Amino acid sequence: MSDQTIFERIWQSYGRIGLTVCIAALVVHDVFGTHGYLALRRTKEEIAKVQKDLERLNKENAELQEEVIDLRTNPDKIEALARDGLGLTRPGEKIFKVPQPQTEKSSK
């Protein structure tokens, strides 16, 4: 027997099986590999989450910028902050503080 006929016999016997195994390995790699379908789906979900966080932070940033502008330009806002936060009053005004009711703590 020549080398060619041995190769042909092996190919006929095991060639299709080997080819099928190689194709199956490539499919598994494309689905489960580091750059496969599942990794791509995970990355897309992560991108969507980051974009959502970015939108929330941009909205929060815009609100804070509006508050800064109000605090720089709106005297009523500054006065309300001083009255509520620092307890300041105008001359002649008095502040009456009402104590909050205390809740009983249960002893165990």
Image (spheres, rainbow, N blue to C red):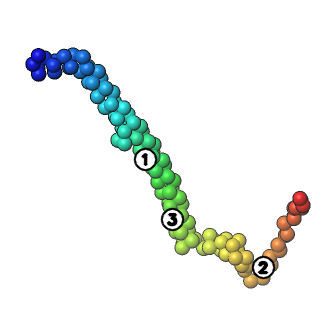
**Residue drawn at (37%, 39%), measured in percent from left and top?**
33
Q: Secondary structure at mark 1?
A: helix
Q: Earlier in the sequence, mark 1 or mark 3?
A: 1
Q: Secondary structure at mark 2?
A: loop
> Which x, y percent locates residue 52?
48, 49
Q: Are marks 2 and 1 in contact (CB under 8 Å)?
A: no
Q: Residue furthest front?
A: 1
- Would you identify the image quadrant in which residue 78 lies? bottom right
**Residue drawn at (11%, 16%), measured in percent from left and top?**
1
- Would you identify the image quadrant in which residue 45 lies? top left
Label number found at residue 47: 1
Separation of marks 2 and 3 at Cα, in angstroms: 32 Å
- The residue at which mark 3 appears reads as 65
> Which x, y percent locates residue 22?
29, 28
Closest to the camera, between mark 2 and mark 3, is 3
Nearer to the camera, 6 or 78: 6
Label number found at residue 19: none
**Residue drawn at (43%, 47%), measured in percent from left and top?**
47
Label number found at residue 93: 2
Visible in this render: residue 105?
A: yes
> Which x, y percent locates residue 62?
50, 60
Specify the amino acid type for callout 3: Gln
Q: Earlier in the sequence, mark 2 or mark 1?
A: 1
Separation of marks 2 and 1 at Cα, in angstroms: 55 Å
Against 19, residue 105 (above or below) is below
Specify the amino acid type for callout 2: Glu
